[in-house]
Structures are given as C-alpha cells and as structure tokens.
Image (cartoon, rainbow, N blue to C red):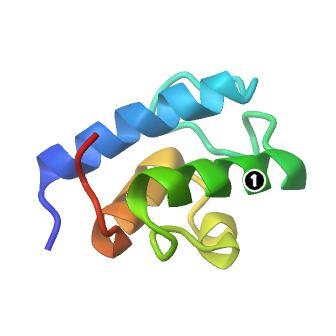
Amino acid sequence: MSNRNDITDIEAWLVEACGALGLRVENADSDFFAAGGTSITAVKLLSRVEERFGEDALTPEALFEHSRLSDIASHIAQHSETRTS
C-alpha cells in the first residue's frame, strides 16, 4: 500500500513532467486535459511514467479515468514498480 509521502513525491514529479510537456499546470489539483493535454501529450506522459515507474504504473485508460494529477499520482503509487527517483 502506498503512503502519503510516496503520493506527494509522485504529484511533484507529475507537475514537473506536465510542465515540461508544455501543459499549464499549477499544482496537483490540475486536470491533465484542462491544462492542455492532448492525445499526443498523453502518449508522451505515459512514456515518461513507464520509464520512471514501470510499464504497469499508468495505462491510457487510467489516464482518461483519473485526469486530475493527484488522482494520477495515487494510481501510479498503487501500481508502480519503483517509487524512488
């Protein structure tokens, strides 16, 4: 089971990763798609998540179902292989 510190670290990583993809995210309460996320940026984010946290950490379906960054972070924390940098 994930703890709050894991989720907070993942939230911070997601905010940074989304910003690097050119999205207008302010914090972990930002919605991926409302911040400008498209199918192309979704694929790029999924690739970065897979590289960092493992291939099962986030699926395309989960990204569409959990589009708020804090929800994505919780999902990753529950499904990731690696929770460290």
Mark 1, Cα crowd under 10 Å, few <14 / some 14-19 / many 20+, is some
Q: Is residue 80 left or right of residue 59?
A: left
Residue 65 appears in the figure: yes
Give the amino acid type for the residue marked by disc 1 in the picture.
Ala
| Residue drawn at (62%, 72%) of the image | 65
Q: x and y percent of residue 80 in the render? A: 35, 68
| Residue drawn at (75%, 53%) of the image | 42
Q: Is residue 83 above or below residue 26?
A: below
Q: Is residue 68 above or below residue 15?
A: below
Q: x and y percent of residue 72 in the render? A: 48, 57
Residue wearing tag 1 = 42
Q: Is residue 63 left or right of residue 82?
A: right
Q: Nearer the viewer, residue 50 or 79?
A: 50
Residue 38 appears in the figure: no
Image quadrant holding the C terminus, namely: top left
Q: Is residue 17 left or right of residue 7?
A: right
Q: x and y percent of residue 82 in the render? A: 28, 60
| Residue drawn at (50%, 46%) of the image | 69
Dot 1: element: helix
| Residue drawn at (58%, 48%) of the image | 48
Q: Is residue 1 above or below residue 29?
A: below
**Residue 78 figure quarter:** bottom left
Q: x and y percent of residue 26 in the render? A: 54, 22
**For the view shown, which residue lies furthest in the front direction?**
51
Image quadrant holding the N terminus, namely: bottom left
Q: Is residue 17 left or right of residue 46?
A: left
Numbered disc total: 1
